[in-house]
Image (cartoon, grey):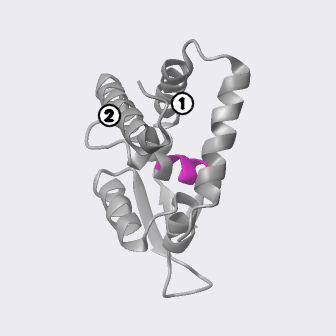
């Protein structure tokens, strides 16, 4: 492959596609039906924070509120999440995992560990840190 900076987005896209296919296959092998790779970040955010408003989720995931609404509704439909009105702001909803959603934690950790092994296979630790640093820099300095 050429060492061409214009290939960066194409390369990132191909890696993302491969990662998503891997995650989809792993979800299926773990018997988890109905979820797509895009639900993973949302599930992890709820596992870490306990419960969040839609705005908080949108900020954490760096996604539009309309996209978050669709993702949350899917988790609710599948029985992995629920919502309740925020006591402090009756206009807001707080989203939280149900016991079924919390039970996914072990599977999500297993899938994540396998994905990281696959991504970093043969990549020295210093290079791992450097690529993460560079991609974080690109993401952080991206203009809205």
User: Of the residues under marks 1 and 2, which one precedes in the sequence?
Assistant: 2
Q: Which residue is mark 2?
A: 32
- Magenta segment boundaries in residue numbering: 43-48
Kindly identify the residue that appears in the image at 63 percent across and 34 percent down.
Answer: 131
Q: Is residue 22 left or right of residue 122?
A: left
Q: Position of residue 122 (x, y in %)?
A: 57, 12
Q: Is residue 112 magenta?
A: no
The image quarter in which residue 67 lies: bottom left
Kindly identify the residue that appears in the image at 50 percent across and 81 percent down.
Answer: 92
Q: Relative to 123, is 46 above or below? A: below
Kindly identify the residue that appears in the image at 39 percent across and 50 percent down.
Answer: 80
Q: Is residue 17 left or right of residue 114?
A: left
Q: Relative to 20, is 122 above or below? A: above
Which element carries disc 2, helix, strand or loop?
Answer: loop
Q: Is residue 102 left or right of residue 71?
A: right
Q: CA distance from mark 1 to mark 2?
A: 14 Å
Q: Relative to 81, is 113 above or below? A: above
Q: Which residue is mark 1?
A: 109
For this orientation, the residue located farthest to the top is: 122
Taking depth in this image into account, of 7 and 144 the one nearest to the observer is 7
Q: Position of residue 2 (x, y in %)?
A: 43, 28
Q: Relative to 96, is 106 above or below? A: above
**How packed is label 2: few (under 14 Cα within 10 Å), some, or many (20 or more)?**
some
Quadrant location of the N terminus in the rendered image: top left
Taking depth in this image into account, of 5 and 96 the one nearest to the observer is 5
Taking depth in this image into account, of 17 and 91 the one nearest to the observer is 17
**How packed is label 1: few (under 14 Cα within 10 Å), some, or many (20 or more)?**
few
The image quarter in which residue 60 lies: bottom right
């Amino acid at each position: 492959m050429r060492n061409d900076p214009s290939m960066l987005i194409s390369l990132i896209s191909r890696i993302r596609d491969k990662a998503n296919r891997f995650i989809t296959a792993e979800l299926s092998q773990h018997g988890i039906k109905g979820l797509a790779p895009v639900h993973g970040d949302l599930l992890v955010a709820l596992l870490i924070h306990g419960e969040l408003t839609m705005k908080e989720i949108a900020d954490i995931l760096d996604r539009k509120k309309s996209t978050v609404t669709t993702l949350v509704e899917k988790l609710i439909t599948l029985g992995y999440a629920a919502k309740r009105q925020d006591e402090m702001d009756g206009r807001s909803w707080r989203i939280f995992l149900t016991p079924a959603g919390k039970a996914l934690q072990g599977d999500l950790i297993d899938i994540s560990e396998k994905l990281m092994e696959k991504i970093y296979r043969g990549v020295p630790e210093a290079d791992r840190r450097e690529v993460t640093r560079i991609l974080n820099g690109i993401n952080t300095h991206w203009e809205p």
